[in-house]
Image (spheres, rainbow, N blue to C red):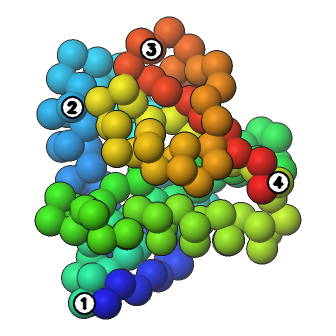
């Protein structure tokens, strides 16, 4: 059974999942990942979701408020390989959106990559549209930036 927990960036399960996400990104983007390491740190004020499958940490995601305080940026979405295809990413995404709506936010932006077709498909399925790449992804051919108005 899948369950979700709202938590903080200090959560040990979230920290472990983020380590696995970073390893996955190095495999998917071996030539460019070093350009984005500095931007992959999660600030302490991030709103974090950890998903559990029968009590085991299976996935995560978070958001931070952007300079336009009515918009969030979704970050660090990840589902363990053995838990993919179970609807966990969908559940995390919908919970992040619900949390943002509770806080009065009007929309979301995010960045994913060309080597993450499953993520791109998920975001399109849930109403995200492609936009011009924003900083720090402006000159990245590997990046796909997206937005959604709630």
Q: Position of residue 98 (x, y in %)?
A: 68, 71
Name the residue beneath numbered marker 4: 106
Instruction: Determine whether label 3 and label 2 are within 8 Å by CB.
Output: no
The residue pinned by badge 2 equals 28
Q: Please state if 16 lies on the left or on the right of 116 as rendered.
A: left
Dot 4 lies on which element?
Answer: loop
> In the rendered image, which quarter is residue 30 located in?
top left
Locate the N terminus by quadrant. Answer: bottom left
The mark that comes first in sequence, 1 or 3, is 1
What kind of element bears circle 2? helix
Secondary structure of the residue carrying tag 3 is loop
Q: Position of residue 114 (x, y in %)?
A: 36, 26
Outermost residue to the front:
125
Q: Residues within 10 Å of mark 3 (few under 14, many from 20)?
A: some
Front-most of residues 23 and 41? 23
Spatial CA distance of label 2 from label 1 is 28 Å
Upstream in sequence: badge 3 or badge 2: 2
| N-term mark: 1 or 4 | 1
Residues at discs 2 and 1 in contact (Cβ within 8 Å): no
Residue identifier under label 3: 140
The residue drawn where x is 38% and y is 19% is 142
Q: CA distance from mark 1 to mark 4?
A: 33 Å
Q: Can you identify the residue that label 1 sits on?
A: 54
Q: Earlier in the sequence, mark 4 or mark 3?
A: 4
Specify the quadrant that holds the C terminus. Answer: bottom right
Residue 16 numbered tag: none
The front one of 92 and 139 is 92
Quadrant in the picture for residue 47: bottom right
Circles 1, 4 touching at the beta carbon (< 8 Å): no
């Amino acid at each position: 059974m899948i369950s979700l927990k709202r938590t903080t960036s200090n959560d040990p399960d979230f920290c472990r999942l983020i380590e696995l996400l970073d390893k996955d990104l190095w495999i998917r983007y071996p030539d460019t990942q070093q350009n984005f390491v500095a931007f992959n740190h999660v600030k302490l004020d991030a709103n974090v979701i950890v998903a559990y499958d029968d009590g085991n940490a299976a996935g995560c995601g978070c958001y931070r408020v952007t300079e336009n305080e009515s918009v969030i940026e979704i970050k660090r979405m990840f589902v363990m390989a053995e838990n993919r295809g179970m609807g966990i990413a969908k559940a995390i995404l919908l919970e992040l959106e619900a949390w943002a709506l509770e806080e009065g936010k009007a929309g979301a932006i995010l960045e994913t990559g060309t080597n993450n077709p499953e993520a791109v498909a998920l975001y399109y399925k849930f109403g995200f549209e492609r936009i011009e790449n924003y900083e720090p992804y402006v000159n990245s051919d590997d990046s796909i930036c997206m937005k959604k108005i709630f």
